[in-house]
Image: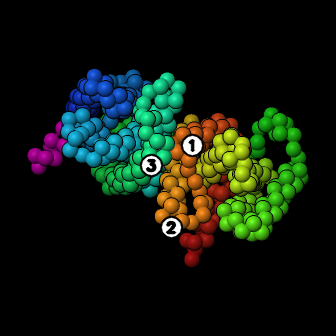
């Protein structure tokens, strides 16, 4: 009984604010300690976390509106351990735990203090995606600072391969703890949040459709800019598919499994729009099919020494591939958002989600490339996916981010219509399943 009373007392706005501001003060002190000791990476991380904690109070202009104290303890604990007893732990342990807890804090603030509405399943995915995205963005920012102003956050004089291996392990650790943190937050939303009565949680804003979301065709200025008729777009798609088929046979003739596998996979991907149309009755605009085909065609074409002879070819293909991944993520999430009342993603937040989604996908792709390289080295196989050091990895993430921003900024206008079609298809499928 005493414990219940204490929990109830602490969850009132005033008491929660006092405890939360106390934890924020501790983080501020940790920031100063880290900077004074020359541990700039952790100093920046602590300052970044403090900024995230302050966001609800600043935007809502109410100093009593703070995240729950127990969540802030979870976030601050690995940073406190790192500042006071870092020699006890393996060097990376506090870092990747901190990344996961920061992602959990971001998800919690988005759910509690904005109009975003999550169910426990989406919460799991969102925390996982945010963990990977934060880890990727964090390393990317440090690398950019090293390149441009001469810091040594990542580029500390060791070889490119050694640094890349270290970062890949950081990404893998972030993946594991991201999954754990996601399930923790999903469990909390499903079983605990409904039973806690506290006025620190703000009421949800009613779901409303906006004019930005109800766009059934690409904007006229963009269509005029392309100046390509649907028939010409279809012709261009067919030409690239024919080239991929030729590439596949050329790889067979040259006995190059790398070229053959790239050709088969790329050709298969180009036929996905046709499969979606015929099997699920969701027609795609020719420009979307061309967009997908162009991305995989240029990637497959790079296997003919283009990646080695043209310096920016890899950057171009990463940006295009990232744009396709961003488009796919937007379409699926928007369709689910339309279909179910348990999830609501406002238009402005969708921009953020697309970027997080693509960064997370980029991190996963880099992990897969790293694992492939390790297997190639161990079993002496032909390389299918390859990495070329930390600079190559960070450049890939940078152009992934660029592709995501392009789609998030204006590409969603092309994708809204297909999202509605997919939502209607989900509704039909769900209705037929319930009848059975």
Q: Which of the 4 image quadrants contains residue 60?
A: top left
Find disc 3 in the rendering and name its residue: 165
Classified by dominant secondary structure, the portion drawn in magenta counts as: helix
User: How many residues crowd around disc 3 within 10 Å: few (fewer than 14), some, or many (20 or more)?
Assistant: some
Determine contact: label 3, label 2, CB under 8 Å: no
Find disc 2 in the rendering and name its residue: 379
Q: CA distance from mark 1 to mark 3?
A: 12 Å
Quadrant housing the C terminus? bottom right
Element type at mark 3: helix
Find disc 1 in the rendering and name its residue: 392
Element type at mark 1: helix
Left or right of 112 on screen, residue 425: right
Camera-side residue: 261 or 208? 261
Q: CA distance from mark 2 to mark 1?
A: 24 Å
Q: Which of the 4 image quadrants contains residue 276?
A: bottom right
| Residue 265 on the magenta segment | no
């Amino acid at each position: 009984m005493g414990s219940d009373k204490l929990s109830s007392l602490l969850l009132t706005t005033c008491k929660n604010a006092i405890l939360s501001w106390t934890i924020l003060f501790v983080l501020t002190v940790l920031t100063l300690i880290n900077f004074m000791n020359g541990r700039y990476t952790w100093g920046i991380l602590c300052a970044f976390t403090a900024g995230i904690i302050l966001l609800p109070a600043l935007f809502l202009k109410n100093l009593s509106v703070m995240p729950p104290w127990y969540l802030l303890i979870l976030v601050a604990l690995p940073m406190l351990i790192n500042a006071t007893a870092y020699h006890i732990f393996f060097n990376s342990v506090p870092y990747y735990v901190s990344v996961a807890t920061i992602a959990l804090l971001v998800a919690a603030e988005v759910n509690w203090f904005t109009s975003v509405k999550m169910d426990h399943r989406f919460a799991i995915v969102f925390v996982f995606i945010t963990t990977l995205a934060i880890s990727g963005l964090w390393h990317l920012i440090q690398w950019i600072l090293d390149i441009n102003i001469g810091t040594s956050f990542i580029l500390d004089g060791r070889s490119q391969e050694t640094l890349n291996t270290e970062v890949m392990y950081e990404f893998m650790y972030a993946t594991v703890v991201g999954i754990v943190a996601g399930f923790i937050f999903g469990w909390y939303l499903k079983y605990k949040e409904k039973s806690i009565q506290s006025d620190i949680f703000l009421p949800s804003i009613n779901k409303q459709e906006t004019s930005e979301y109800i766009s059934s065709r690409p904007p006229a200025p963009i269509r005029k800019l392309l100046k390509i008729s649907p028939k010409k777009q279809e012709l261009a798609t067919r030409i690239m598919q024919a080239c991929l088929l030729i590439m596949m046979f050329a790889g067979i003739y040259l006995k190059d499994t790398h070229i053959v596998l790239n050709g088969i996979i790329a050709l298969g991907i180009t036929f996905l729009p046709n499969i979606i149309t015929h099997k699920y009755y969701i027609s795609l605009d020719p420009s979307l099919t061309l967009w997908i085909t162009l991305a995989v065609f240029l990637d497959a074409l790079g296997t003919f020494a283009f990646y080695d002879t043209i310096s920016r070819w890899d950057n171009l293909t990463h940006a295009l591939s990232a744009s396709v991944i961003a488009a796919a993520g937007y379409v699926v999430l928007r369709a689910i958002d339309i279909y179910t009342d348990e999830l609501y993603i406002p238009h402005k937040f969708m921009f953020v989600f697309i970027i997080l989604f693509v960064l997370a996908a980029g991190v996963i792709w880099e992990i897969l490339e790293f694992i492939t390289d390790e297997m190639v080295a161990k079993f002496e196989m032909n390389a299918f996916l390859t990495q070329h050091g930390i600079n190559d990895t960070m450049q890939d993430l940078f152009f992934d981010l660029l592709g995501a921003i392009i789609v998030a900024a204006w590409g969603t206008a092309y994708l809204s219509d297909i999202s509605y079609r997919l939502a209607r298809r989900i509704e039909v499928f769900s209705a037929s399943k319930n009848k059975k």
